[in-house]
Image: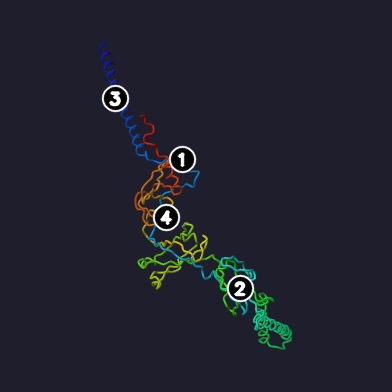
Amino acid sequence: MKKIFFVMAVYSLTFTACHHTHEGHSHDAAHEHDEHQDEEAHENIDAIHFETEQQEKIVFAVEHPAIETFGQVIKTTAQIQSSQADEAIIASGTSGIVIFPQGNLTEGKPVNPNQPLFTVSGAGLADNNSNVRFTEAQTNFRKAESDYKRAQGLIQEKIISEKDFLQIQSDYETAKAVYDNLYKNFSSGGQTVSAPFAGYIKQVLVENGQFVEEGSPLAVVSKNKSLILKADVSPKYAALLPYLSSATVRGMDKITYSLEELNGKILSFGKSLNSDNYLIPVSLQIDNKAGFLSGGFVEVSLKTQSGNPVMTVPVSALTEDQGIFFVYVQLNPESFEKREVTIGVTDGIRTEILSGLNKDERIVTKGAISVKLAQSTGALDPHAGHVH
């Protein structure tokens, strides 16, 4: 009996010791877990809370940084010029007095194809050239038409040779073309000069009532669809010009377009210095999809090819504070961290990131300003919640 009692006493002591040991471990584990949570809370104490409901009310997007080739960028300005293929000089087909049939013809006025713009009248002149030309063309056409009809009968009877018939036919077709052209544009008031295509009046070269000779330029009409950008580059970039691959264009509206968005291309670059300013000319061609005005200026960033991949982010992802640049890194769907980054070159659309960001992190690319404002409005009073 004593032996049994001794065994039970030993078992009781062992159980009690084990129970205290497990309680100690449980208490230590709970304490360590609380400390870990406190550390995480301390680490994210500066996190910016931007709720999903707020994100849905604005244009908001997050994405990973891009790893891409990004060569050197040459920043300059360029003057906008109309493409030569997009312009036409309207000339007078006869001598006479220029009349604006629709009143004042102003620069910038839109025109339609075959829209009458001028009338050149010889009325009242001693030598009314337009009337003389029209009368002569009409006479020549009627004679050629009569000869051609008679020759059709003679060739069937083989009275004239095939060669003679073809010559008569050619003379008729030429006389008809001249007469039809003059008849279409001629009236009792003079010769009508029309727009060759849809576009606008770029320049008016004459005044209402002015006398002009045959062939005198009257106006310049432009389609305003294709534009040439004439840029000048410092000679220090001469070695980079053979490696130009693309460009971005920033207009007066402060919107930056890629060359691809404007269906553009780099036409050429100079092989010598411009004698006027000792700079190297570079020419680009673009479609006028952004309402650019010929004669104005735009900012151009010329991009060179590079085989070295770098990290880039959209310009819209960056915010600036006293010359220091930041991005907002997404920690979870509603929490963001303001992160300082070092930037490199930029083309106005994307910017190189030298340090401060990892390629696997997600950053705010649209709506960064709203997150920045949320940081300002969400800052807590350090004394809030304390009882004094």
The residues tagged by marks 3 and 4 sit, at their Cα atoms, a distance apart of: 61 Å
Give the left or right position of residue 25, taking residue 160 as reference.
Answer: left
Precedes in sequence: disc 3 or disc 1 = 3
User: Quick check: 213 above or below 255?
Assistant: below
List the single residue furthest toward the top. Answer: 1
Nearest to viewer (mark 2 / mark 4) = 2
The circle drawn on residue 208 is 2
Precedes in sequence: disc 1 or disc 2 = 1
User: Quick check: 185 above or below 27?
Assistant: below
The residues tagged by marks 1 and 2 sit, at their Cα atoms, a distance apart of: 67 Å
On the image, numbered disc 1 is attached to which residue? Answer: 51
Depth check, front residue: 309 or 121: 121
Q: Residue at x 38, y 36 (%)?
A: 381
- In the rendered image, the quadrant that contains the C terminus is top left
Precedes in sequence: disc 3 or disc 4 = 3
Nearest to viewer (mark 3 / mark 2) = 2
Depth check, front residue: 353 or 101: 101
Task: Residue 268: name its quadrant.
Answer: bottom left
On the image, numbered disc 3 is attached to which residue? Answer: 21
The residues tagged by marks 3 and 2 sit, at their Cα atoms, a distance apart of: 110 Å
Mark 2, residues whose alpha carbon is within 10 Å: few (<14), some, or many (≥20)? Answer: some
Precedes in sequence: disc 2 or disc 4 = 2
Precedes in sequence: disc 1 or disc 4 = 1
Mark 1, residues whose alpha carbon is within 10 Å: few (<14), some, or many (≥20)? Answer: few
The circle drawn on residue 350 is 4
Q: Amino acid at mark 2?
A: Asn
Find numbered disc 3 in the image and state the secondary structure of the residue it sits on.
helix
Q: Amino acid at mark 4?
A: Arg
Number of numbered callouts drawn: 4
- Pointer 2 with pointer 4, Cβ within 8 A: no
Q: Residue at x 52, y 71 (%)?
A: 84
